[in-house]
Image (spheres, rainbow, N blue to C red):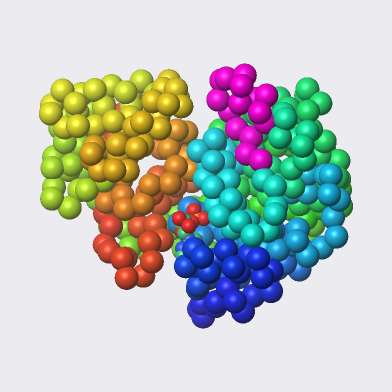
Amino acid sequence: EEVGYFEDLALSDDVLDALWDMRFEKCTPVQGRCIPHILEGRDLIGIAQTGTGKTAAYLLPMLSLLQNEPHAEDAVNCLIMAPTRELAQQIDQALQGFAYYTHTNGVAVYGGNDGIRFEQERKAFAKGADIIVATPGRLISHLQLGNLDLSRTTHLILDEADRMLDMGFFDDIKTIIKELPQERQTILFSATMPAPILALARATLNRPVNIRAEGADAQATVPDITQFVYQAHDLDKPEVVARIAQARDASKVMVFCRTKRAAQRLADELQERGFPATAIHGDLNQIARERSLKKFRAGTVRILVATDVAARGIDVTGISHVINYECPDTDSTYVHRIGRTGELRGEQQRRQHRQRSIAGDSR
Ligand code: AMP
């Protein structure tokens, strides 16, 4: 498929200037196919996972639309929903970059247990926000307190809809959608399309265009990932992880567990065996998680043990190995996990990335 250039799309000049600064020239296939439809105001279903460039595929046309079309100055014009605070933060960061020259005012709204942040979010709404990036639970809290009005929000984006479903946010999403006007543009991105997502799309989208990223499908995985299965008893599994992590090409190893306890236990066990490992999961506070991520990103610690929930949306490039320490519950979780490696890194840097699975737990 022909890959186009951003310059050839009807994006606003201010958005193109930001892309120029960021050295984004060529569209990814998903971007090339989604952007023209979104600019036309169509509803859209994008079947694409992290690494396909899906975030820019909706942010760039959305920013251009908000600049070019008449819209209320004092309304929240666009709402972007993400399943986790890490993804919300990542979208917000991308937004800040793309919106640099547009004077668009974006506010990120995500969990965190402190009242200070909640109050900051409330004040930001009061001052006016063009775009809100939010996790479902947090947005509902604000809605219930009357901090925010979505009755004039004409653009809605649901990112990683399948993860929202997996994480039990579906009722929240439906509640939120009811706050928006019927007349709006709705865009839904999901790595997989299980039946409840299709049903939601049918109920909430209006004659959507369907765009499928190459290879995006419940069974499909990223093409340049080599997958291995190791059989091991539960007690031997930490040893297998340690051996994989010893390989010379194992520069950044991400290990997935299903529970917070299992993740912490494995990280501790690897540490005891002399393999520096760090963990991210829901029992750690935001500061501890960011500290773990920083070490892993910098390469001072080569092994990161994570739960699916905590790992969702975090942006770490150059992951050499993904280990499925415990089997995921759903196809989509598997696709998301292994999608952490083999991500888009510019063609020159494209290397062979490996992914390994350890089978043999009792499932
Ligand atoms: P995403 O799939 O949206 O999570 O994007 C994956 C990564 O690719 C992010 O780090 C983006 O900054 C980067 N990216 C997205 N689109 C492009 C592009 N057209 N050119 C270069 N990098 C891109």
* Residue 205 in view here: no
Q: Quadrant of residue 263?
A: top left
Up-down: is 68 above or below 55?
A: below
Q: Position of residue 88 (x, y in %)?
A: 57, 41
Q: Position of residue 17 (x, y in %)?
A: 59, 68
Left or right of 304, for residue 340? right
Give the residue at x 21% y 43%: 230
Give the residue at x 70% y 54%: 103
Q: Quadrant of residue 297?
A: top left
Give the residue at x 81% y 26%: 146
Up-down: is 301 above or below 317?
A: above
Q: Is residue 112 magenta?
A: yes
Q: Position of residue 295 (x, y in %)?
A: 30, 36
Q: Position of residue 265 (x, y in %)?
A: 28, 21
Quick one: 142 or 24, which is closer to the camera?
A: 24
**Residues shaded magenta:** 107-121
Quick one: 347 or 173, which is closer to the camera?
A: 347
Quarter of the C terminus within the rendering: top left
Give the residue at x 58% y 28%: 111
Q: Is residue 204 magenta?
A: no
Left or right of 301, for residue 47? right
